Image: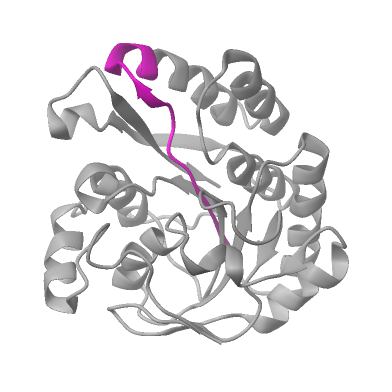
Amino acid sequence: MARSPAVAGRFYPDDPVALLEEVQRHLEPGVPRVSAQGVIAPHAGIMYSGDVAGTVYSRIEIPETVILIGPNHTGMGERIAIFSHGSWIMPFGDLEIDATLAKNILKDLPIACENEEAHRLEHSLETQLPFLQYFCKQFKLVPICLMRLSFDECQMLAKAIVRAIRSCDRPVLIVASSDMTHYESHTHASEKDHRAIDQILKMDPEGLFRTVEKEGITMCGVNPATVMLTACKELGATQAELVRYMTSGEVSGDMDQVVGYAGVIVR
């Protein structure tokens, strides 16, 4: 199974030369790179959230295997949908699915399904790939697309990911794809988002999940972030760092209806 790009030419350039130039515009040159177990990075069009995503990926080393976890915006497919074999076609080159790692997660988690339909038109994972490929030309990936889950279901998925990572005995980066507050003023979005970010920086996945729920924060990737944070803690991570926060208003000039973007590194 080969997945074609769903949002090339819209969320990011579909021409490799133009895409290279666009990615480079959003990077943070000259910063030291660290080994990370997980990150949170946004998934809007590259012109809006690229500065935050670029800051995250400029600061980390990309291993040979990446688990991508993102929210399901389309409503298609299964609740926990894992793309388990084949490849993803991208302007920078095709990427192979880590079938062994994907199958191990599926085998360990009955509520997860082998499902390609959820990924076919979804942008939340695809938009991470140009940045990842810029720093690591060839890596294997495991794409996981999530609908709304309970906290307990997030924990179950995180534990299955941890067991699968431990069984493969090699470095794996877990990427949680998420935007933050949607369509509120810059001031309100920033205030609400930092309540959620505070829980991330405390390494408290349940605190994050409950805060987003209680405060009505429209963080579309709260489930991916909860899963990533839980898994990284289990794998020994002890700290999370906010490397950049901004809103779309800082790009568009419209401060009344913004989307928030947070970039976090967990290690």
Q: Position of residue 35 (x, y in %)?
A: 48, 58
In percent of width and height, residue 236 lies at 70, 49
**Chain part drawn in magenta:** 173-190
167 relative position to 44: left or right: right
The residue depicted at 53 percent of the width and 37 percent of the height is 240
Decide if residue 68 is on the left or right side of residue 126: right
Name the quadrant containing residue 263. top left
Q: Is residue 73 visible to us here?
A: yes
Residue 13 x, y percent position in the rendering: 19, 66
The residue at 77%/37% (across/down) is: 150
Q: Quadrant of residue 142?
A: bottom right
Q: Quadrant of the N terminus?
A: bottom right
Residue 86 or residue 191, whichever sits in front: 86
Is 188 colored magenta in this rendering? yes
Residue drawn at 24 percent across, 45 percent down: 51
Colour scheme in the image?
one colour
**In the rendered structure, does residue 108 fall within the stretch colored magenta?**
no
Depicted 133 relative to depicted 2: above or below? above
Q: Is residue 182 left or right of residue 157?
A: left
- Residue 86, given in percent of the width and then of the height, sits at 57, 86
Front-most of residues 156 and 73: 73
In the rendered image, the vertical position of residue 33 relative to residue 166, given as above or below: above
Asked whether 168 or 238 is in front, the reply is 168
Height in image: 138 above or below 207? below
Q: How many marks?
A: 0
Q: Is residue 172 visible?
A: no
Q: Residue at x 58, y 37 (%)?
A: 222
